[in-house]
Amino acid sequence: MRPTARGLGLLAAGAVLAFIATSMHSSTVGSLAALPLATLLVALVWVGLHRLGWPRIDLHRVVQPRRPVVGQWAQVQLQTVPSRLPAWTTLRERLRGQVERGGGDGGGYRVRPLRRGPLQLGPAVVLRTDPLRLVRWRHVAGSSTEVLVWPATVDVADLVRLWPQRYPRPSEAGQPERSLDDLTLRDYRRGDDLRRIHWRSSARHGELLVRQDDPMTDTSLSIIVDLGPKESSPAAATEWTVSASASLAVALVADGQEAHLALAPMRLPVPVSDAASALDAFARADHGRPPAPDQNGHDALVAVLRTPDQGLLDELCPLASTRQCLALVVDADPVVADSLTSAGWLVAGTGSGEDIGAMWDRTLVTWGRQ
């Protein structure tokens, strides 16, 4: 509990008047000095009596969307218990981290995260005063809320659908053959082979349908991301690398493909089956050596590398002997590119800051021609 600026001013005025009254031996001035001091004393007594009886404020937050995206606005709704704040009470919300705060009212406010990863909202501080706002006291309402900020991504779903690498490979011998009764159809997708269109069914349904009458085994793809050493702020190259990698991963899982992510600080590559899981992983991606995929695997591999150390290169180079491997070297280092190329990798270079959609268009088309 402490006096406000108004209370301090009143206290200073009373002290000055008391000094003048003493110097002049004036009872009239002394009465004037007693008035502000008595007012401040009454405010202290009022606050002391009401502080014991006023309810303690608790607070809950609802963030929409639940996972904000870097550079985009999100709405934070504040729900207090009790629902209506007592008189002469205000609520102030603390924000920690790189975030911009927008306008709002007592029911909430807007935030625009400037960096991916965990973001702390709160705790809130409740400020209470007397009716004259001469004395105030504060207490913390509720606890803080952590939200995970997703990296910004670019929609490259159309590029992935046209990418020849996305199609499943024929299954191994020994599996039973399909009969005509087992034939299944699906909607035509841009890039499908026209020879696989089932024209009779397409005419009957009024839309193009494609045959899926060959036994197939789905391929999977692993994405390994090395962010290199930490940068001094702003970490433009790091964040561009994360956004480019996340854009590809989201497009893959949205297309129904199986994807495995290998990012620091993971200990092992993890499978992801939906875009939210992939973006959660990229939101927490950090500097350090990512885990290398299993050397006995046969899935395709995309490695997005900023400045990999020699140990990681030694783990990656042998993988090209058992699978198709593409390395995207950001701010290309000739030594890294030469090492991977000589080991059988297809290597593409890019600069951090290049348009992500154009970069993946060029890179995936080049890989599909190999």
Image (cartoon, rainbow, N blue to C red):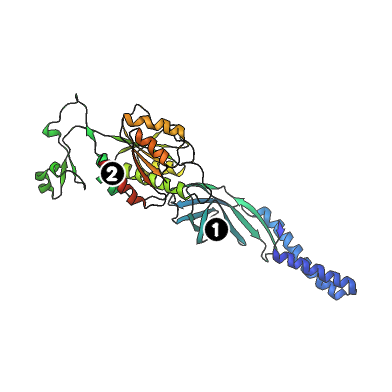
**Residue topped by disc 1:** 84
Q: Residue furthest left?
A: 200
Residue drawn where x is 42% and y is 31% of the image: 314
Q: Position of residue 94 (x, y in %)?
A: 57, 53
Residue drawn where x is 41% and y is 44% of the image: 332
Residue drawn where x is 38% and y is 44% of the image: 245
Residue drawn where x is 32% and y is 51% of the image: 358
**Which quadrant would the N terminus be assigned to in this image?**
bottom right
Which structural element holds mark 2?
Answer: helix
Query: In this rendering, is residue 33 above or below 334?
Result: below
Query: In this rendering, is residue 18 above or below 354?
Result: below
**Residue topped by disc 2:** 366
What kind of residue is marked 1?
Answer: Arg
What kind of residue is marked 2?
Answer: Thr
Q: Is 345 or 188 nearer to us in this picture? A: 345
Mark 1 vs mark 2, foreground winner is 2
Crowd tier of the residue under label 1, counting other residues whose Cα lies within 10 Å: few below 14, some 14–19, many 20 or above: few
Q: Which of the two discs, 1 and 2, labels the residue nearer the N terminus?
A: 1
Query: In this rendering, is residue 295 above or below 335?
Result: above
Q: Position of residue 279 (x, y in %)?
A: 41, 44
Measured in 3D between alpha carbons, the distance from the residue under mark 1 to the one under mark 2, in whole angstroms, is: 62 Å
Q: Position of residue 265 (x, y in %)?
A: 48, 36
Q: Is 10 or 247 nearer to us in this picture? A: 247
Q: Position of residue 312 (x, y in %)?
A: 44, 33
